[in-house]
Amino acid sequence: MNVHGIGILFSGGRGILSFENVLKDGWQRPAEYDIPHINKKTLAYIVKPEYIEDKVLLKKMRRADKFSKMAVIAASDAIKDSGLDIEKNRIGVILSTAFGAHQTSFDFLDDIIDYGEVGVSPITFSNSVHNAAASYIACALDITGPTLTVTRFFFSFQSALQLAQTWINDNCCDHVLVGAVDVCGEVMRYVFDKKSGSSADGKIRPFNFSAPSNPVPGEGSVFFLVSGRSAENAYCRIADIDFN
């Protein structure tokens, strides 16, 4: 399975070039954000609002939530990055996530408490459904192939890759947009602080085995356009997908 295009949206910007520049610049301290209901701040890698502004691409998604907008932008950029002319009915979409649009889900629950069942927004409810983002991708990019959302706390992206390989092998589609999306909203920052707490200096030390190292929460989206076809300009080939 070959990777033909990559789209990425993260705290440092949008696109492969932005990601490359951030890697070259080295580590930068993440920004501080308020934790709701307690007088405290936490460090987090959050996607800035200006990175999600794309009036042309998102013109039909003005009421979509941040989760769906990040997904659409990364998926669209992956197709553009490939430079391929692809039949839209032969493209599949697989979105993987650990927590889905959890912030929108909690916003909907807050509305039920504040306004009652008859006063809640149906748009907020529709955006809280985990498969909404994949549907937004299909609508925004005119894709009519199969779409699916994989939700797992662990290895959701690896599971999505396995499914993409199956679709290609079974000739369900020629190309698959497979990606991962997660947001870090107020609820997540609150829970994170209560359960773990962010690294005091904002640095993640995964190989520091002598002492526990606290992680840093973050959000972003990344999509890969993959297929079983070979191409000279492909980024790489995924030879195998295995995880335990």
Image (cartoon, rainbow, N blue to C red):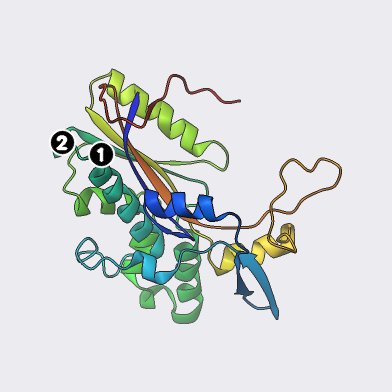
Nearest the viewer among 28 and 8 is: 28
Q: Is 226 left or right of 24, judged from the image as shown?
A: left
Image location of residue 4, percent across then percent down: 30, 33
Q: Quadrant of residue 70?
A: bottom left
* Badge count: 2
Label of residue 86 in the image: 2
Q: Judge depth for marks 1 and 2 and give the one in front.
A: 1
In the rendered image, is residue 8 in sight? no
- Quadrant occupied by the C terminus: top right
Q: Kindly indicate whether the residue at mark 2 contacts the one at mark 1 (C-beta within 8 angstroms).
A: yes
Whole-angstrom CA distance, mark 1 to mark 2, is 10 Å
Image location of residue 188, percent across then percent down: 59, 62
Q: Is 103 left or right of 209, judged from the image as shown?
A: left
Compared to 164, does 43 lie above or below? below
* Residue at the far right in the pictured view: 210
Which residue is located at x 61 percent, y 56 percent? Answer: 27
Image location of residue 131, percent across then percent down: 36, 49
Which residue is located at x 85 percent, y 47 percent? Answer: 211
- Kind of residue sitting beneath label 1: Ser
- Quadrant occupied by the N terminus: top left
Location of mark 1 (residue): 82
Image location of residue 8, percent across then percent down: 39, 50
Q: Secondary structure at mark 1?
A: helix
In the rendered image, is residue 137 in sight? yes
Which residue is located at x 22 percent, y 27 percent? Answer: 174
Nearest the viewer among 44 and 126 is: 44
